[in-house]
Image: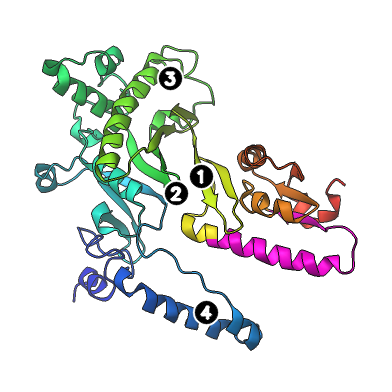
Amino acid sequence: MDPMAEVLRTRPARSGRTGQRPFGSLGDKIEVDRYAELLRKKVSDVKEQLKSVVAASVLEQAKIFSSERTQSQHRAGPLAIQRPTAARRSEGIFLEFSCWDPEAKDHSLIDPVEVPIYSLAISAALEAMRRMPIVLDGDMSECNDDAEWECVDTDATSVRADRSADRSADRSAAWGKIIGHGLRSAQFHSTLSGELMVCLAYQDARLKYLKKGEVLPEEDGNTFETSSQGQTWKAAAAEFKALLHQGVEAAGVQGSKIDVIGRWKRRRLVLGRDFVQESFALEDGRTLTYHQPEGQFSNPNASCEVHCLNWLCQQAKEAVAQTRTSRSSSPVLLELHSGGGNNTVALAPTFQEVRAVEINRILAEAAEENLKMNNIKSIRCTRMLNEVYRNPASLPV
């Protein structure tokens, strides 16, 4: 039997048919209708693995929190972007998304309507983007890496100003070429609060040796952001964003807020914001708001994150109650690898003081912002180098 056929037979696509056109599979199929059964099996398997190191009484009392069966994943990507086949193009598909399949050792195509675990906003955005008139490099025979902007109309007004009906096709072609030129992958980040952030990643070989802040010879600004080329991309991104918004709302996501980011090596353009703002409603009545920056860690399963925060807060309250029997004041919590303050903000009211430590500058700044938004003042955030993890005693007191 052909090796690829064997892969397809033994490891069906993770989300149903997706992945079997044309390169292979994405692993085990997600059978959402059997979620409860599969969860019970997973719990049984995990307990079996832990029974040699965890007391049986503890395993028996373990609380299990289930995920949503569908639309649970609020992050997707990076997904590689490639041109569709002629047959797919005739169906109105302008680009395809794919990801690496370790079984087939090749990229496997993704059909967003066949991925039940993506949030509704992400599924709708993926499908809308596939059907936009975006022109990828291979469709632009006159373009190449040595002529980054020469193959597109760099007059931004041709993209955003002329709204007449007889020029609508030309405008679509203009912004579609700009968005598509050099486009290699995309990432999506949605929230329970109805926001969506899309990051488009580009490749240009000429940027490899360019220093940060430098511009290419044909770019006419002091920086890429101020050049007409950069402004042209932002104008095209505005057209892209408008169509994305239409597609997301048509799928039933009303009142969504969408932000678009373009990334090249050593340069970035932002249309709107470079973050999303998430809200979690906890069992104790609090609603916590979080600033989640583009490209930084956050739990992709937002509903399970709420379960996690509720559980952590309950455990912390019980631990503090036991400690108070032998102490007159509440204990101080030291949190290492605190990230953007996700747990820090939730746990803060339980402790007299929280000392949070994080290496990543962007996450440390996000944590400071999250403390302000949630009106928490009992936390000291510290950004330190690796030494603090090897020697916590070096923390300031």
**Does the residue at mark 4 contact the one at mark 3 (Cβ under 8 Å)?**
no
- Calculate the distance from the C-alpha at mark 1 to the C-alpha at mark 4: 31 Å
The residue drawn where x is 11% and y is 16% is 166
From the image, tell me which residue sits under label 3. 216
Say which residue label 4 marks.
Answer: 46
Q: Main secondary structure of the magenta part?
A: helix
Question: For the residues carrying marks 2 and 4, which lies nearer the camera in this image?
Answer: 2
Q: Estimate how packed mark 1 is, as few (under 14), some (14 to 19) or many (20 or more) residues with alpha carbons within 10 Å.
A: some
Q: Of circles 4 and 3, which is in front? A: 4
Which of these two is toward me, 134 or 189? 189
Between 160 and 175, the one nearer to me in the picture: 160
Residue 192: numbered disc: 2
> Residue 154: percent from the left, percent from the top?
30, 16
Identify the magenta region: 307-336
Tag 1 and tag 2, C-beta contact below 8 Å: yes
Task: Name the element at disc 2.
Answer: loop
Crowd class of label 4 (few under 14; some 14 to 19; many from 20; radius 10 Å): few
In the image, which disc is placed on residue 278?
1
Relative horizontal placement of residue 61, taking residue 13 as reference (left or right): right
Q: Which image quadrant for residue 125?
A: top left
Amino acid type, residue under disc 1 in the picture: Glu
The mark that comes first in sequence, 1 or 4, is: 4
Q: Residue at x 39, y 32 (%)?
A: 205
